[in-house]
Image (cartoon, grey):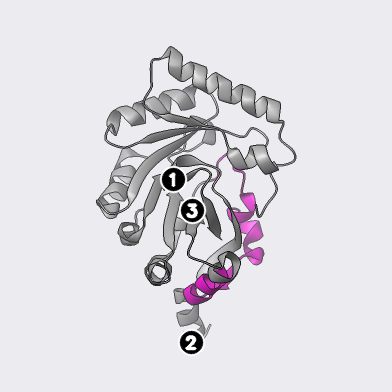
Amino acid sequence: MTSETAAHEAHSLRLSEIFGPTVQGEGALIGQPTVFVRTGGCGYRCRWCDTPFAVLPEYRDQWQAWEPEAVLDEVDRLAGAPVLVTLSGGDPALQELGPLIRPGHERGHTFALETQASVSQSWFADLDHLTLSPKGPSSGHLTSLGEIEACLDASGAEPRTVFKVVIMNDPDFDYAAELAANYRDYPFYLQVGNPVPEGEPEPDELMRRYRWLVERCLSERWYAPTILPQLHVLAWGNARGV
């Protein structure tokens, strides 16, 4: 590899896809129009991951290197106006996204990031919205409180920071309740998990799981979290690019 090629790769972003405008299907910004910038690569291998094409190394040849300015040009082309840009993955915290966010603000865009909170970055402070989504026991991973604290310290007071926990079963619920007890000053969003990340999910089963989660919260008299389905899965199933 030449020094010129190495420098190019150091400043480029490894992306799985850019698509939209669509609406955000999860968390604090659910229903808001957005363009997704999905990075490639992740440090986790969640059992129920619904974006393996942005996570697993066997898909690496499908990921493309983009210069930050080219990403913003594509966002401008897709949206035609300033828009919320959702930085997703994989885990976008693995890459240096500051050179994308700062000039993106100059173009009038706002930026939201979702990460499992296992990696902190100084550029978290440049975000408008930060969603920390530690994974519960059903995922096969547990993010440590130390890693979460590092992300909160990196973000500071600037972005609106919330927690979102995917709930697949009772141990996930208990994990979310324990997290909420540790972070009482932050809004919590509980998201029903999709048990069929590939193929066509059954809307009735998704809503049954949603009703279970609502009833579980109410039976525990835990009224603080916002309890959500996956809006995009209900609307489009597991289709990519919507």
Residue 239 visible (yes or no): yes
Task: Compare residues 129 and 118 and report the one nearer the observer.
Answer: 129
Residue located 34% across and 57% down the image: 124
**Residue 59 x, y percent position in the rendering:** 65, 59
Magenta segment includes 53: yes
**Residue 65 x, y percent position in the rendering:** 56, 72
Sequence order check: which comes first, mark 3 or mark 1?
3
Q: Name the residue under label 1.
A: 116
Q: Name the residue under label 2.
A: 4
Q: Could you tell me how far apart the alpha carbons at marks 2 and 3 are, in whole angstroms?
A: 27 Å
Q: In terms of image quadrants, where is residue 238?
A: top right
**Residue 111 x, y percent position in the rendering:** 42, 58
Please name the amino acid that badge 2 sits on. Glu
Q: Mark 3 points at which residue?
A: 91
Please name the amino acid that badge 3 sits on. Asp
CB contact under 8 Å: marks 3 and 1? yes
